[in-house]
Image: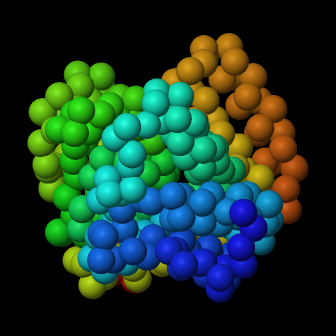
Amino acid sequence: MQARPNEYKTILYSLEAGVATITLNRPAQKNALDMVIREELSDAVSAIRRNPTVRVLILGGAGGAFCAGGDISTMHSGASAEESRERMIKLHYTIEDLITLDRPVIAKVDGPAYGAGFGLALTADLILASQRARFCLSFLRLGAIPDCATFYTLPRMVGLQRAKELAFSTREFGAEEAKDMGIVCEIQPYDRIDERARQIALSMTALPSSALSITKRGFNASLNSDLSTMLELEAAGQGVARSSEFHRDAARRFVNKEPQRFRWPSEDD
């Protein structure tokens, strides 16, 4: 599928000032993932990977929900194991594209992020949540197992025991607990979360793209690697980063006690 952004039926896509925004747009279904939205999300993410003008991606949902998970009404309970596996593999391409995207991904979670929706949020580098956000690994309630790379992302974020507890209990929890567990980095009022996500995204477009990409790749690789490998990545990456015009200008500004080019925006800005 290679749709143009204005031809999408289940997502909204925009690109402005280096910030791409994908909004899941099935509000009547709380943005549950059917096959159409999966295909359109895949198309949009693939296009972003090929577009060097995209510096940051924001991922959100319309209508006071992030994503309620897979659309159960479109799942065929009589499907064979092979058919179900093929269905998941198609989604996995998109999930892997999001996790390995060499630019920052911000998820803004307003309302429910259940099941696959929770897994989708975990593909982001930073998760902002509204005060009414709700998270739930609901899979076992339905006789299913966690998907959307949750086996990979969640233990790395909250630890193995806590990840098992969230999966086994299928309990719901809110933004404050999610922040305490390290899932959420900021909590915002629901009518402020869009503005805050864009504020952060725009600030990061001022960062040097090569150094930012290497930094993300380094952290993503760290938990599957060893000290020697990470030190080599650090040395090679630092060579690239310090050869940039950004570094030379930042060093000059530092020596001359001039304001730096980048500053993380405070919530009061």
**Which residue sits at x=57%, y=36%?**
86
Residue 239, above or below 82: below
Judge left or right: residue 28 versus residue 162: right
User: What residue is shown at x 24% (from left), y 32% (from top)?
Assistant: 143
User: Along the line of sight, which residue is nearer the eye, 13 or 262?
Assistant: 13
Query: Where on the picture, by quarter, is residue 261?
Result: bottom right
Q: Position of residue 226 (x, y in %)?
A: 60, 14
209 or 21: nearer the viewer: 21
Query: In the shown orientation, is residue 79 left or right of residue 185?
Result: right
Question: In the picture, which quadrant includes the N terminus?
Answer: bottom right
- Residue 265 visible in rendering: no
Q: Nearer the viewer, residue 257 or 106?
A: 106
* Quadrant placement of the C terminus: bottom left
Pinpoint residue 55: horizontal percent, then vertical percent.
68, 67
Q: Quadrant of residue 30?
A: bottom left
Indicate whether 105 appears above or below 14.
Answer: above
Q: Position of residue 217 (x, y in %)?
A: 65, 39
Q: Is residue 4 visible?
A: yes
Q: Is residue 126 left or right of residue 136?
A: right
Q: Residue at x 17, y 28 (%)?
A: 168
Q: How is the rendered protein coloured?
A: rainbow
Q: Position of residue 228 (x, y in %)?
A: 68, 14
Along the line of sight, the residue nearer the viewer: 41 or 122? 41
| Total residue callouts | 0
- Residue at 32% x, 53% y: name it: 72
